[in-house]
Amino acid sequence: MIIIPPPFFRALKVAATIIILLLVWEICCRLFKVPNYLIPAPSEIAARFNEKRGLFLGHAWVTMYETVAGFAMAVVVGVIAAALIVIVPAVRDVIMPVLLIAQLVPKVAVAPILLIWFGYDLLPKVVIAFLVAFFPIVVNTASGLAAVERELLELSRSLEATRWQTFWKFRIPTALPELFSGMKIAITLAVIGAVIGEFVGGNKGLGYLILIANQELDTPLAFAALFILSLGGIILYWAIELAEKVCIPWGHDIDHLDIHGIP
Amino acid sequence: MITTARAKTIELEELHKTYVTRDDQIVALAGITFSVFSHEFVSVLGPSGCGKTTVLKIIAGLVSASSGNLRVDGTPISGPQRKIGIVFQVPALMRWRTALQNILLPAEILGLDMAAARARALELLRLVGLEEFSSKYPRQLSGGMQQRVAIARALIHDPSILLLDEPFSALDIMTRNQLNVELLRIWSERRKTSLLVTHSIPEAVFLSDRVVVLGQRPAKVLEIVPVTLPRPRAPELRVSPEFMQVVDHIGRRIGLEYV
């Protein structure tokens, strides 16, 4: 009997699900003769992608750049803001309302104004990606930084640890898992932010490509761009998951030895 | 070993503590007076919520007394001190650090020589019987093992005083008994002046030279019971008539207070 290792088996299941979905899609399109400007069959999307593949690389690169730059800004500014909120209680009452208002304003509505401020190049897209990714990072990191066990804080006081030591040795490691879950939400939002920016104005990026393809009723091309966009998002998400595993070696992936009950 | 005129390491004199909340005043301690001699093992025993942990936190410098005097080695104190090591009710280990790294934490914060601290940490791991677990994370250790790591961590900077705040109350009774024996062994090897807060009468009697019995809140000292049972104490002592007699005496003392 052949024993299939669990991770491989899981990958197999994921692949099978995707292949079956694509097959059903293909069959439905052919069976019901759906016109390709409404819903193109996967084979048509693949063919169109193949024709225009030179086009995609440049646009995909631009969108990924905007996403990653906006996300990186969100992480840096978000962690600093979260640290201020937790460490300086007086700052909390200043930052939190501003944050909340900024979060509640629809970014799609702000995007045209940002274009006026920052021009039609990449900068406004980076800023929009930053704005949508910022909030989950601040909120998650702040609650993580505040979640240090009471007894650990008493230990730090009993050893007369400096504020700086308490922050680096006690708060930051406590907050890491929360920071990563915030980053996972943020990276998916940053992709959306970048595309919103490209929709509003500009002449580069996958969002722009989708817009142009739509205007020309080239639906297979729009779908191909969508697939590339999702693929990029998934790769970025995986990269963060990988970083999480490297940065949190004490996390859930360590085999749990069942030795409870042994004193 | 009997020494004459032993030095008082910890002296509490008429300690009062009142917690003030927005609309209430809670008197936790109503004049606590007792001393712990150098190299002595003393337990503070009392019902849950009687304020015995407050006594320990005042000595640790984590809570300030409302009035009264506290002297450690003859000097009045009002803050944390290096000569004190603390073990809490929960292990309070950093889950991102291995057992060894957890033990080294106080050494890092106090800026001690790390090479020497590392050697001491390995020795302490051996002392608490965990030398094979130095590179394990807390989640890979049982509750009893985690508390042993916490004890080793409290000893890394070689404090002269060890404060233990109900360290075994979250453990099952078998593990607890075993750790009592372990603690006794550690104490007899290191001879730290030790103050244990507990609500278990057998635990207090088994470990201590003297038991300070507190009443219900607001806490006052009901009686200081000397435990003259011979040392070294073996686990079998717990079922001996002499042991039972002391336990019974304290039980009645607390019981009378409840009536």
Image: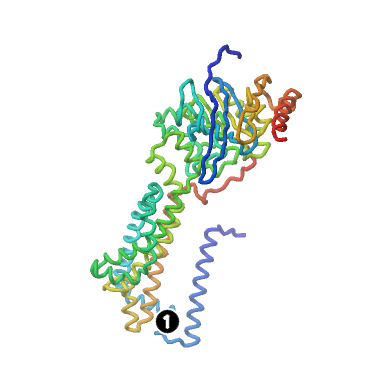
Q: Nearer the viewer, residue A94 or B190?
A: A94
Tell me the amino acid under the disc marked 1: Pro
| B114 horizontally vs B216: left or right | left
A119 on left or right of A22: left
Q: Is residue A72 above or below residue B128?
A: below
Query: What is the quadrant of the N terminus of chain A in the image?
Result: bottom right
The quadrant of the image that shows the C terminus of chain A is top right
Q: Residue furthest right?
A: B241
User: What's the residue at 51%, 63% (across, down)?
Assistant: A11
Instruction: Indicate the position of residue A207 as horizontal and vertical percent values.
Output: 33, 73
Residue B242 image offset from top left, x and y in percent: 74, 22
* Residue at the spot 50% in from the left edge and 67% down from the top edge: A15
Horizontal arrangement in the rendering, residue A168 relative to residue A116 (left or right): right
How far from the left and from the top, in percent, is residue A198?
Answer: 31, 71
In percent of width and height, residue A70 lies at 33, 61
The answer to whether any part of residue B167 appears in the image is no
Residue indicated by mark 1: A40
* Chain containing the residue with disc 1: A
Look at the picture and state if B65 lies above or below A62. Answer: above
Residue lying furthest top: B4
Q: Residue at x 44, y 81 (%)?
A: A41
Judged from the image, the secondary structure of the residue bearing numbered disc 1 is: loop
Q: Residues within 10 Å of mark 1 (few under 14, many from 20)?
A: many
